[in-house]
Image (spheres, helix red, strand yellow):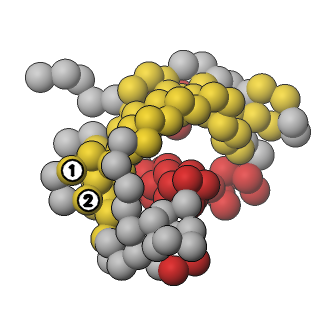
Amino acid sequence: MPTGGRYDAGIHALPVRVYYEDTDFSGVVYHASYLRFLERGRTEFLRAVGMNQQDLHSGEAVAFAVRRMTVDWLKPAVMDDVVTVETRPAEVKGASLRLEQRILRGDVVLLTADVLVAAVSAGRPARLPQDLRDKLSPPPSV
């Protein structure tokens, strides 16, 4: 998976390079750019567990919508940094999924996010099919 990061032990890690377009006038990553990085991380996490969003939209007509997000910006990233977006499932319910995400530069945590996404179909809440719930369930704690 050359562009989609790696998935190991229930954590998906996606490297992202910070470009000029991601920064403000001072070369520091603009706060909204982090939200795009997190979205890419969630999308690639879904791919890593065998779920292509395009297939979900066309076949089962299920999409994911962010319902709630709590973000803590801890340290800034700057232009040309390579950061890692980590995504891990925290809780799977019938029609929603809670994910824990972090953005790191090396071992330094720059941002943490707790994200609740809801499954929707035709603009209404929808149950996740069981096979999808099984793929998304967090691995058992050791």
- Vertical relation: 27 (above or below) 29: below
The residue shown at (27%, 40%) is: 10
The residue under label 2 is 105
Residue annotated with mark 1 = 108
Q: Secondary structure at mark 1?
A: strand
Using the rendered view, name the quadrant where residue 135 is placed: top left
Q: Is residue 16 left or right of residue 140?
A: right
Query: Where 130 falls versus 25 (above or below)?
Result: above
Task: Point out the image quarter for the N terminus.
Answer: bottom left
Residue at 47% x, 78% y: name it: 19
* Lateral position of residue 37 relative to residue 48, left or right: right
At which x and y percent is residue 140? 23, 23
The residue lying toward the viewer, choosing from 75 and 3, is 75
In this rendering, position of residue 3 left or right of residue 61? left
Name the secondary structure under disc 2. strand
Q: Are marks 1 and 2 in contact (CB under 8 Å)?
A: yes
Looking at the rendered structure, the kind of residue marked 1 is Val
Instruction: Give the residue at x 29% y 53%.
Output: 104
What amino acid is labelled 2 in the image? Arg
Can I make out residue 14 in this image?
A: no
Disc 1/disc 2 C-alpha distance (Å): 5 Å
Please provide percent x and percent y for residue 24: 56, 68
- In the image, residue 23 lies at what x, y percent? 53, 70
Residue 4 on image: x %, y %: 39, 67
